[in-house]
């Protein structure tokens, strides 16, 4: 059974599930595989690990692959807030550990850091991006108003028009120009601010395994980043992620990393290619086994 963890109204979940069924593979959309009526047993001992999962509480299901898009949320009705938070954390931790143990293809089998905070700012990705040889924006994180202003003035002198203020807790950003530095200095009295160089329009790409699917044909300079992007994905332990490359005065650089792919960032034709690639990656091993069995009969 191929499991799709997520919601029925998610474009990705619906598309992958439909493709599995069209190709003749057993597949099922599951909001929470560890909740009743499912029966879940995960046994660990010196001999190894054993998993039994009965989605309908009856016969065990063999898990052939898992696509993780959403892991659900416990309803708050009847729960004390502290108890609800505890149970939510316990459920997610158990699911994370179980997914990590599965020998079958799992997209995405993320680290705990990404699992609990998938909307990380670009700053958090910089070590991995630079380790993969990818160009990144100039960034300053400071509570010193003079340093912040000098950084902005330098960018303005290079024709950038100011600096982008990019909070570390959201994906929002706004341009800080000459008239904004006094207000920013007041904010810096309370908290450091993260500033980065502005960039032009972005070009989105989706990485699925060892494939890169660009939303539009990339320039030769952008296409040349492909080996580095794949190296970054492998180092990050991600088999599905979205990246956006932007044009700057220094050439193309990585402006966005999104492990929870936003399908609305892609044209319809690209979305279809991404779904096909996902099912290929998830069902590839099962498909090869079935082809061998059919050839031998």
Image (tube, rainbow, N blue to C red):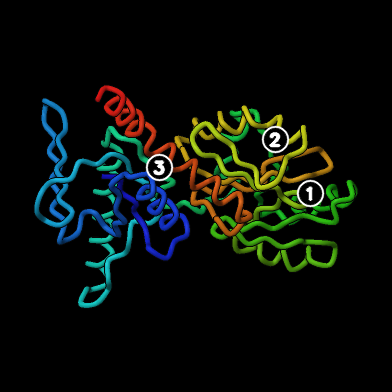
Front residue (pair 27, 75) = 27
| Residue 107 numbered tag | 3
The alpha-carbon separation of the residues under discs 1 and 3 comes to 40 Å
Q: How many badges with numbers are in the image?
A: 3
The image quadrant that residue 33 belongs to is bottom left
Q: Kindly identify which residue carries mark 1.
A: 151
Q: Is residue 238 above or below residue 59?
A: above
Q: Is residue 201 above or below residue 78?
A: above
Left or right of 107 on screen, residue 200: right
Dividing the image into 4 quarters, which one contains the C terminus? top left
Q: Kindly identify which residue carries mark 2.
A: 135
In this view, the mark in front (1 or 2): 2
The image quadrant that residue 89 belongs to is bottom left
Which is nearer the N-term, disc 1 or disc 3? 3
Secondary element at tag 3: strand
Left or right of 79 on screen, residue 199: right
In this view, the mark in front (3 or 2): 3
Residue 44 locus on image (x, y percent) = 14, 35
Q: Residue at x 67, y 42 (%)?
A: 254
Secondary element at tag 2: loop
The alpha-carbon separation of the residues under discs 3 and 2 comes to 26 Å
Residue 40 locus on image (x, y percent) = 15, 49
Which is nearer the N-term, disc 3 or disc 2? 3
Q: Residue at x 11, y 25 (%)?
A: 47
Left or right of 227 on screen, residue 240: left
Which is nearer the N-term, disc 1 or disc 2? 2
- Crowd band around label 1 with a 10 angstrom C-alpha radius: few (<14), some (14–19), many (20+): many
Name of the residue lying farthest toward the bottom: 78
Left or right of 22 on screen, residue 227: right
């Amino acid at each position: 059974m191929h499991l799709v963890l997520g919601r029925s109204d998610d474009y990705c979940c619906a598309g992958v599930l439909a493709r599995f069924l069209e190709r003749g593979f057993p597949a099922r959309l599951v909001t929470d595989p560890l909740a009743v009526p499912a029966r879940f047993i995960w046994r660990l001992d010196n001999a190894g690990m054993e998993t039994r999962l009965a989605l309908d509480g009856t016969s065990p299901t063999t898990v052939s692959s898992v696509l993780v898009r959403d892991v659900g949320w416990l309803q708050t009705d009847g729960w004390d807030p502290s108890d609800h938070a505890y149970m939510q954390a316990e459920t997610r931790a158990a699911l994370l550990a179980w997914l990590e143990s599965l020998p079958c293809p799992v997209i995405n089998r993320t680290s705990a850091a990404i699992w609990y905070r998938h909307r990380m700012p670009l700053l958090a990705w910089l070590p991995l991006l630079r380790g993969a040889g990818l160009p990144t924006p100039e960034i300053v994180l400071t509570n010193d108003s003079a340093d912040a202003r000098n950084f902005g003035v330098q960018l303005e002198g290079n024709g950038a028009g100011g600096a982008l203020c990019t909070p570390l807790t959201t994906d929002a950003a706004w341009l800080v120009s000459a008239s904004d530095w006094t207000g920013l200095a007041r904010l810096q009295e309370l908290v450091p601010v993260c500033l980065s160089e502005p960039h032009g329009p972005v070009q989105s790409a989706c990485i699925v395994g060892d494939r890169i699917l660009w939303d539009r044909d990339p320039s030769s300079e952008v296409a040349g980043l492909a080996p580095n992007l794949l190296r970054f994905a492998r180092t990050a332990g991600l088999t599905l992620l979205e990246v956006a490359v932007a044009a700057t005065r220094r050439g193309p650089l990585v402006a966005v990393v999104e492990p929870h792919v936003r399908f609305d960032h892609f044209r319809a034709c690209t979305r279809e290619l991404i779904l096909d690639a996902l099912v290929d990656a998830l069902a590839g091993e099962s498909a090869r086994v079935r082809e061998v069995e059919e050839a031998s009969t």
